[in-house]
Amino acid sequence: MTEADFRSLVRDNKDKVFNTCLSLVKNFEDAEDLAQEVFIEIYRKMEQFENRSSLSTWIYRIAVNKSLEHLRKQKALKRNVDYASLDMEMKDSNMFYHPGVTLENKEKSAILFRAIDQLPSSQKVAFTLHKVEGLSHEEIGKILEKSKSSTESLIHRAKMNLREILKGYYEKA
Amino acid sequence: MKKRENEPDEIMNSLQNLERAKPSPDFERVLFQKLQFISRPSWMKWFRYGVAAMLVLGAINLYTLYQFNTNDQISTETQLDYLYENIGIDEPYYLNPITEE
């Protein structure tokens, strides 16, 4: 792959990689760093890419894996740090406002993103890719290396869980 | 926010017509800077192979020296003793100096 080819690959895919990372990690600086790491990995492993899946699926898979790895590290870090000192910071970081959301949906989407955070990883990824990136069940299945039917059931369970979480949220309010 | 019956469903649909977030304008420049930093020249690869080969040879040398020192071989002293006693070679005077009485 020439440098020009790689530059055009970055130009074509940077928005979707950044948007996927941002929707999962919910922090602009981290998402940008992660998106850059994704492209560095693509650059390093381009020769290993087998045409078993499409390039887009492969890129999404790397982005998702990098984001989940980052979340795991962050979780482990929080476990080791004094919770009280982070309390204020965490309250702020829980409210994530995606820049692409329309103004009237701003508050609702922030509540939804907070609820998504409480889902198990696989449900979180499947739901986010479906709602944020607008991917089909089939595409998500290829990214997560699952069948179409199990992806459908994953998203269905994610929706059920989110309804429960949101119901709980409104009962408290 | 007031509580309403259909609110959870509205929230669930709040991500409809979402536009993709865009990275900062510096994104590509920073990415290529990082790539330049991490990609080493090709001679670096051969240099690393050279260092690895030297380490392997060094390890083999150390192992050989260790084996040589711990081996139960007949020491030079024992060999000389054997020669003095059985073959009749005279012990050099300096090993058994004549003392004046």
Image (cartoon, rainbow, N blue to C red):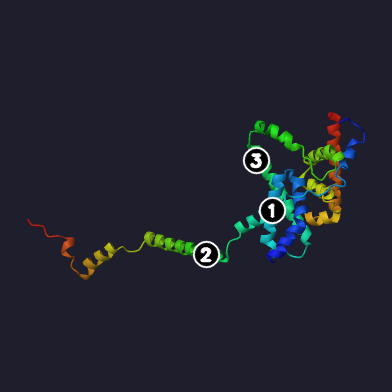
Q: Position of residue A121 (x, y in %)?
A: 76, 46
Q: Would you name the residue on which mark 3 appears?
A: A77
Q: In 3D space, how far apart are the residues under numbered discs 1 and 2 (Cα atoms)?
A: 28 Å
Label 1: which secondary element: helix
Q: Is residue B84 above or below residue A81?
A: below
Secondary structure state at the residue bearing disc 3:
helix
Which label sits in the foreground, 1 or 2? 1
The answer to whether residue B39 is left or right of residue B25 is: left
How far apart in space, not on screen, are marks 2 and 3 (Cα)? 37 Å
Quarter of the figure that contains the C terminus of chain A: top right
Element at label 2: helix
Do the residues at pointers 2 and 3 share their chain?
A: no
Q: Residue lying furthest front in this view?
A: B25
Specify the subunit that label 2 lies on. Answer: B
Q: Position of residue B89 (x, y in %)?
A: 20, 69
**Badge 1 amino acid:** Gln
Q: Which residue in the structure is indicated by mark 1?
A: A36
Residue designated by label 2? B47
Say if mark 3 contacts mark 1, CB within 8 Å: no
Image quarter in which the N terminus of chain A is found: bottom right
User: What's the distance in space between the residues labelled 3 and 1, CA to CA?
Assistant: 22 Å
Q: How many marks?
A: 3
Kind of residue sitting beneath label 3: Leu
Residue A50, image quadrant: bottom right
- Compared with residue A14, is residue A96 higher up or lower down, i.e. above or below? above
Asked if residue A126 lies left or right of residue A70, the reply is: right
Q: Which one is earlier in the sequence, the residue at label 3 or at label 1?
A: 1
Q: What residue sits 85% from the left and 36% below the top?
A: A166
Label 2 packing within 10 angstroms: few (<14), some (14-19), many (20+): few
Image coordinates of residue A93 in percent, x first then y, are: 73, 37
